[in-house]
Image (tube, rainbow, N blue to C red):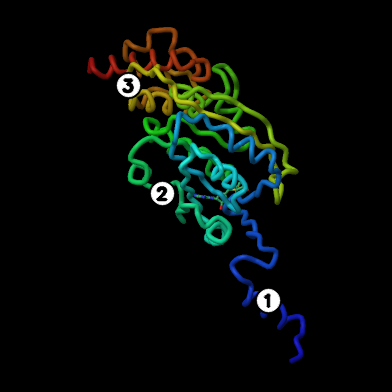
Amino acid sequence: MVIDNFTAIIFLTQVTPIINNMNQVRAKKYLGQHFLKDMGIAGRIADSLILDGKTSVLEIGPGMGVLTQFLLQNPLIDLTAVELDKESVEYLHQHYPQLNVIEADFLKLDLKTIFPDKFCVIGNFPYNISSQIFFKMLDNKDSIPCLAGMIQKEVAERIAAPAGSKTYGILSVLMQAYYKIEYLFTVHEHVFDPPPKVKSAVIRFTRNEVSKIDCDEQLFKAVVKTSFNQRRKTLRNSLKPLVEAGHPMYADPIFDLRPERLDVAAFIDLTKRVEAALASK
Ligand SMILES: C[S@@+](CC[C@H](N)C(=O)[O-])C[C@H]1O[C@@H](n2cnc3c(N)ncnc32)[C@H](O)[C@@H]1O
């Protein structure tokens, strides 16, 4: 049989197996796939969780298992992985048959059903959904004592930013309210295949043993989100959707401030004022 170039391309496309000839998963941009090549860094990330005895751990986005291989070796870790990419799941089944891997979107996972008790979270996270991962973590904060992983450096800096800094925002306040945050180390682009356009960072969150939040938690979240929805405005202007303009509450000079000036304690105080104003209606 004579195969011209065109026929050869069709032929190759049709017979390309799920795992390609290199026995590697082909990186897909829409899934945020940047595979870590550096075993030293993978080992450091896998070691960064703080474990209190034998612990259930969820790895988000194991890809080809560069972190997974270290996690599976740790006798304290009872590992489950969630991976959205079918090709990666096939790869994991072949290379790590002992791994419990769920083929699903982490954001749609019912965590309470899978982990009725406490569990930790780890991963070299898909950067396109890192904020959503943290909001989901906050929704499950009572079950998650520790999370460690790699995200975009800029996002890690933003979450760890102190009050008063330009990048301080909703996630900084909410995560700092419930977790101790440690920026562990920076990771350069060249250790990934394909390299991302941005630098990365490994960050760790450890749940505060004593809750700082002694106000209504739902209202606290609403006050933080509403305040930052218009971050260039003063609190007097931005909080109007919660408490109507002209309310006596606004006489206090705290409402002259922009939201980035307030640390967690000040947001708790603000929430109590809003709560009192709503109760006095
Ligand atoms: C940055 S890659 C990291 C892969 C691997 N852990 C590594 O370090 O080489 C992110 C991984 O998350 C997976 N992923 C993307 N979106 C996901 C989602 N919504 N739920 C679960 N996994 C997802 C991707 O398929 C990819 O394998």
Question: Does the residue at mark 2 contact the one at mark 3 (Cβ under 8 Å)?
Answer: no
Q: Nearer the viewer, residue 271 or 46?
A: 46
Single out the residue that lies furthest toward the bottom: 1
Along the polypeptide, which appears first: circle 2 or circle 1? 1
In primary-sequence order, the first of circles 1 and 3 is 1
Residue type highlighted by circle 1: Leu
Picture layout, residue 239 above or below residue 92: above
Badge 3 local density, few (<14 within 10 Å), some, or many (20+)?
some
User: Counting other residues with Cα less than 10 Å from the Cα at mark 2, is it few (<14), some (14-19), or many (20 or more)?
Assistant: few
Query: Where is residue 206 drawn, in percent x and y?
Result: 49, 26
Mark 1 residue element = helix
Question: Amino acid under label 2?
Answer: Lys
Task: Report which residue position mark 1 lands on.
Answer: 12
> Quick one: 213 or 93, which is closer to the camera?
93
Corner quadrant of residue 185: top right
**Mark-to-mark CA distance, 1 and 3:** 65 Å
Dots 1, 3 in contact, CB < 8 A: no
- On residue 108, which mark appears? 2
Q: Is mark 2 within 8 Å of ligand 1?
A: yes
In front: mark 1 or mark 3?
A: 1
Say which of marks 2 and 3 sits in front.
2
Q: Residue at x 76, y 81 (%)?
A: 5
Q: Give the residue pinned by disc 3.
A: 244
Q: At numbered mark 2, what does the secondary structure look like: helix, strand or loop?
A: helix
> Who's the residue at 39% across and 17% down the image?
210
Find residue 111 and report its horizontal and vertical position in percent: 38, 43
Residue 81 horizontal/vertical position (percent): 49, 48
